[in-house]
Amino acid sequence: MLEMGLIEPDELLRHYQNGKRDFGRLNLSEAVLIHMDLSGVNLQGCGLVWSNASGACLQGADLSLSNCTKVKLIQADLRDANLAGANLSGADLSWANLSGANLSGADLSEATLNAPVLEGCNFSRVNLRGANLRSVNLQGADLSGADLTGCNLKEALLAQASMTRVLLSEANLSGVNLTEANLTRACLTRVTLVRADLRGIILNAATNVRRETISGATLNNAIFVGACLQGADLSGANLSQANFSGACLEGANLVGANLTQANLSGADFSGADLTKADLGRATLAGVDLSGAKMPDGSIRS
């Protein structure tokens, strides 16, 4: 029988090959598990700090609540693995296959996820503060309640993702594809959205969306009902057919923006700069344009 505590990798593999699967709460810190086949293994609550499991097969494994700080999982097979509540801070998951994995409530702060496979992955309530997610494919992923503060999501694919109540403060979303993503009640303080594609995005009642860098973004058909975009930089943005009803854009920069057929009813554009903006066929019922600089350069009284 295995005793609780430290176990050597070769001992683990021997027991595994003899049919044992339950290794919960053992200490595998700094273990070398490179290319090992441990599919379906139970490592719940284990210590895997600084371990190297690059290329390992952990398909269907249970790593929930495990301490995987600084672990290397480069090119690891983690399909359908349970990583709920695991500590993966500083982990390297580059090129790992996480299809169908459960990462709900996991800590992935400052983790590296270069080109991983994330199809069908559950990221709800995950901590990804400062993580590098550049160019990752998270299309349709569940990121509701996740903490993406300071995260690098440059050129990532987040189309149709569920991102309700997500924290994106100071995140880099330059060139990101957020078409039809749901960011209801998301926090976007000082987020960067240069050249982002936000067509059909849902941003109802978003908070702290102030003085953002959203210049040049594609936002046609976006839904900003009740959103706070006070002081936001939307210069040159394509906002055709966007819905801003009841939104606050006080002091926003909309120079050269395309607002054709946009719904601005009941929105607050006071003090906004609309120089050379295109408002053709826009709905302006009840809109507040006091002090705004209009497309012809005149100031509304």
Image (cartoon, grey):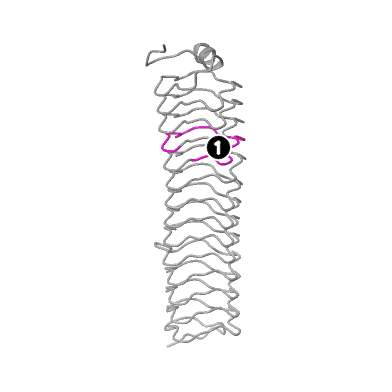
Name the residue carrying label 1: 80
- The residue that appears at 41% across and 42% down in the rendered structure is 105
Look at the picture and state if 146 lies above or below 21.
Answer: below
* Image location (x, y in percent) of residue 118: 58, 43
Residue farthest to the front, as pictured: 19
Eyeballing the image, is 245 above or below 222? below
**Quarter of the image that includes the N terminus:** top left
Residue 98 shown in magenta: yes
Does the stretch in magenta take in 199? no
Establish if 62 lies above or below 253. Answer: above
Figure label count: 1
Question: The magenta stretch spans which residues?
Answer: 84-102
**Identity of the amino acid at label 1?**
Asp
Which percent across, then down, holds residue 48? Answer: 45, 24
Q: Residues within 10 Å of mark 1 (few under 14, many from 20)?
A: many
Residue for point 55% across, 69% down: 222
Please identify the dominant SS of the magenta region.
loop
SS under mark 1: loop
The image quadrant where one finds the C terminus is bottom left
Q: Is residue 193 left or right of residue 270?
A: right
Residue 186 percent across, percent down from the top left? 43, 59
Q: Where is residue 226 drawn, in percent x and y?
A: 42, 72
- The residue at the point 53 percent across, 37 percent down is 112
Left or right, 228 with reference to 98: left
User: Which picture quadrant has residue 196?
Assistant: bottom right
Front in this rendered view, residue 76 or 290: 76
Q: Nearer the viewer, residue 106 or 99?
A: 99
| Residue 288 against residue 132 in the figure, above or below | below
Q: Residue at x 53, y 84 (%)?
A: 283
